[in-house]
Amino acid sequence: MILEYVIGALSGGGVYALLTIGLALLFSVMGLMNFAYGELLMAGGFAIYLLRDLPWPLMVLGTIAAVVVVSLIIERLAFRPLRDADAMTLLIASFAVSMLLQNSARMAAGPTALGIEPYDALQRNADLLGASVPVIDLVAIGVTSALLVALLMLLTRTQLGTQLRAAAEDFEMANLLGVRANRVIAAAFAITGVLGGVAALILILRQGTVSVTIGQMPLLIAFVGAVVGGMGSLAGAALGGFLLGAVTGLLDAVLPGELQPFRDAFVFGLVVLVLATRPQGLIPVREVRV
Amino acid sequence: MLEIRNLCAGYGSIEVLRDTSLTVGAGELVGLVGHNGAGKSTTLKAIAGVVPVRSGTISWLDGPLTGGAATRIRHGIAYVPEDRRIFTQLTVAENLSLGATVRTATDGAAAIERELERFPVLRKYYRRRSGDLSGGEQQMLAIARALVSDPRLLVLDEPTLGLAPIIVDDLFRTITTLRDEGTTILLVEQNVAKTLQVADRAYVMEPGGRITFEGAASELAANETFRADYLHRGSREARA
């Protein structure tokens, strides 16, 4: 029983870690709190719906590619013209983009949720050390772990990663050293697209439906996770997202039926407690020694 | 090599520089001194492309210097800002590699090796997070990072600010060596006495970016009015 809870928590936590890293990356690099990020999940959901009849590898690659393209289009059309704008303008622009995408999708697909036929292999349970755990949770853990390792390698072992981390710390200085702003910001949006695409695949294939509002609750949890972890610190954001997702998954499993409607109250109560004791987040950006 | 003519620049509604003009010749070490708020740092920021030019011109190698901050280093102008602005979350190695952004991998690696020879302490802490370095080491890293780009003009803003006297002496020795190696340097410094010891020429800037003296550094160092205003007062303030 305990192993089942642990697998559920790791699975939920991993997905939210992907989302919070995406949010924190854009926030660090260009000061953008991207509330249109939820719509990347929505775009991923509709891509899954449209590509559902293709063999699964093509569906997966197609979905990720579609979300990356949407993310890059958002960057090019909405945020690049606002490159020098203040944080408040960027925030409002991200709400505008969010509304535009949601309403465009509502016009195209209608207001009701669309069902996505589950993949049989993902719906089964597997035997793991005597525990019966959903295959989709194991897949989610494997995929998110692999993606987090790949992201870590990209950020720490490549010149692009070094440029991204430098830009996240001091964008102007990175620019003065010749780091091209357009390239590094587009890379950040592409990475958030990949993270959002993978998160959409896991969340939506587990849920089996897609609607225009599908990204809203995950976005809220990811945003709170990023704040709890320490906005501006990628490691902190990942930890915050992971913990929030894990706690949410754990409460889903352990709360008795009559308390289930209050799950989010428990989660956000915990958030208030964490922020009251560590207002700078769990892993704040390390202080500079001079 | 660098020629600033009637430069006006500032922040928002505040115009810090009004009709500022100065030149830096190839191979020169030029000191720009003056009281706080005169506009020295703003002049350097305008050269670096951080502060926009409102009117006037900045010419570089016989052509107008245009484009944003990212283009300056491609023109061969490297800027070391007042507060160093090393990437404290990154290692010394990563900071230096960023200095080589505009160079090929081979040239960049050779330049990094050259700077590690110049600043051995950076080799010692090569894999260490740069935020853990001391202030003097961070300043060396900031200068080394700029030098990795192989600049034709090195623009230094207050490189010795807040450093221990022994480190200050080291840094001035390094600056002199760089000039002797042929790097053109424009230096803004609060340590006026040392600046005039190492500089070839100097400018004195008053508020509004007004240049009140232009000439040989040795001539300025011997000027009694200047000495009373800057050198003696500086030492009195230091004693106080």
Image (cartoon, helix red, strand yellow):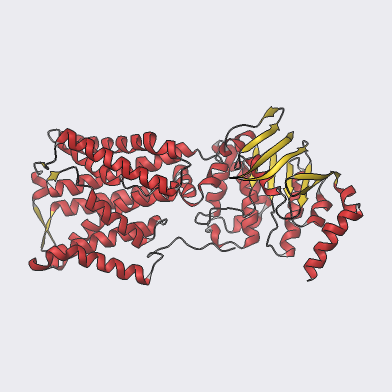
Q: Residue B189 at what x, y percent from top left? A: 74, 53
Residue B45 appears left or right of A70 = right
- Asked whether A156 or A96 is in front, the reply is A96
Q: Decide if residue B236 is on the left or right side of residue B42.
A: right
- Compared to residue A131, the image places residue B54 above or below, namely above
Residue at 23%, 65% in the rendered image:
A267
Q: Residue furthest front?
A: B13
The image quadrant where one finds the N terminus of chain B is: top right
Q: Position of residue B232 (x, y in %)?
A: 85, 62
Among all residues in the image, which is located at the extreme top? Answer: B63
Evaluate whether residue A4 shows in this view.
Answer: no
Q: Residue at x 24, y 52 (%)?
A: A218
Q: Is residue B65 above or below residue A171?
A: above
Q: Is residue A138 left or right of residue B198?
A: left
Q: Nearer the viewer, residue B98 or B47?
A: B47
The number of numbered discs placed on residues in the rendered structure image is 0
Asked if residue A205 can be seen in this view, the reply is: yes
Q: Position of residue A167 (x, y in %)?
A: 48, 47
Pick the quarter of the image with the C terminus of chain B.
bottom right
| Snapshot quadrant of residue A229 | bottom left
Q: Quadrant of residue A258?
A: bottom left
Q: Residue at x 58, y 61 (%)?
A: B133
The residue located at (82%, 67%) in the rendering is B236
The image shows residue A199 at horizontal and vertical percentages of 24, 47
